[in-house]
Image (cartoon, helix red, strand yellow):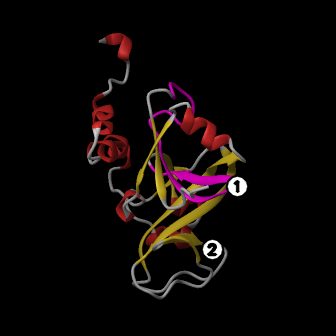
């Protein structure tokens, strides 16, 4: 099985509702046991400073919590992008320069992270579940760019990721919010 670790799952219009509607998911882990990722384009109204005051200074704008997915919404998960080769204490590499940051450990040093986001919850799939959803056309798998995780305009990320594709996938970016209103 080819791993999807470090790639993006972009929801197709086949997902017509629920937490994954027009979502962009960064896959943190994927193997025979299942997959784990975070939705990177769902900012919440809660500021990081209100929940984790010491971490607010390290988070990229918008400085808010993100809805990472429907699993374990009462827990926080921090995903960072390394700025240099020296990871912060408690770093767990996931793909390339992207990894998990231990929110209970010491704060990162100046210049260690190029970006950081804090997610409430995560997206998870059991063994074979994601592969089934891919086969039914619910997701498009595309390459991730580091700045996808820290986009200053996450609400436009779904369309941006689709538009930058080289094939006909880019046309999904023009799919109307309500196809019945056409």
Q: Is residue 27 left or right of residue 76?
A: left
Quadrant assignment for the C terminus: top left
Depth check, front residue: 30 or 44: 30
Would you identify the image quadrant in which residue 70 lies? top right
Q: Is residue 143 magenta?
A: no
Q: Comparing marks 2 and 1, which lies closer to the viewer?
A: 1
Range of magenta residues: 15-40
Question: Can you say whether 54 is above or below 39 in the image?
Answer: below
Residue drawn at the location 32% of the way across and 23% of the way down: 176
Quadrant assignment for the N terminus: bottom right
Q: Residues within 10 Å of mark 1 (few under 14, many from 20)?
A: few
Percent of width and height locating residue 28:
57, 60
Element type where label 2 sits in the image: loop
Residue drawn at the location 61% of the way across and 42% of the way down: 131
Residue drawn at the location 55% of the way across and 30% of the way down: 136
Depth check, front residue: 44 or 1: 1
Question: Can you say whether 27 is above or below 71 in the image?
Answer: below
Element type where label 1 sits in the image: loop
Q: Is residue 132 left or right of residue 171?
A: right
Q: Is residue 17 magenta?
A: yes
Quote the CA–CA distance across marks 2 and 1: 25 Å
Q: Which residue is mark 2?
A: 102
Question: Can you say whether 41 is above or below 92 in the image?
Answer: above
State which tag comes first along the sequence, 2 or 1: 1
Depth check, front residue: 27 or 178: 27
Q: Which mark is residue 32?
A: 1
Q: Residue furthest front?
A: 1
Q: Which mark is residue 146?
A: none
Q: Residues within 10 Å of mark 2 (few under 14, many from 20)?
A: some
């Amino acid at each position: 099985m080819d791993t999807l670790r470090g790639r993006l799952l972009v929801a197709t219009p086949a997902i017509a509702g629920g937490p994954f509607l027009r979502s962009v998911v960064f896959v943190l882990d994927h193997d025979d046991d299942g997959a784990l990722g975070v939705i990177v384009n769902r900012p919440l109204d809660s500021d990081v400073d209100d929940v984790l005051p010491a971490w607010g200074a390290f988070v990229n704008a918008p400085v808010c919590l993100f809805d990472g997915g429907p699993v374990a919404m009462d827990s926080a998960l921090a995903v960072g992008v390394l700025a240099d080769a020296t990871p912060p204490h408690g770093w767990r590499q996931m793909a390339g320069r992207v990894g998990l940051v231990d929110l209970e450990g010491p704060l990162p040093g100046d210049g260690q992270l190029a970006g950081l986001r804090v997610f409430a919850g995560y997206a998870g799939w059991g063994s074979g579940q994601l592969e089934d959803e891919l086969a039914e056309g619910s997701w498009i798998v595309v390459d991730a760019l580091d700045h996808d995780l820290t986009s200053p305009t996450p609400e436009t990320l779904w369309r941006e990721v689709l538009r930058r594709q080289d094939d006909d996938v880019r046309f999904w970016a023009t799919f109307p919010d309500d196809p019945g209103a056409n």
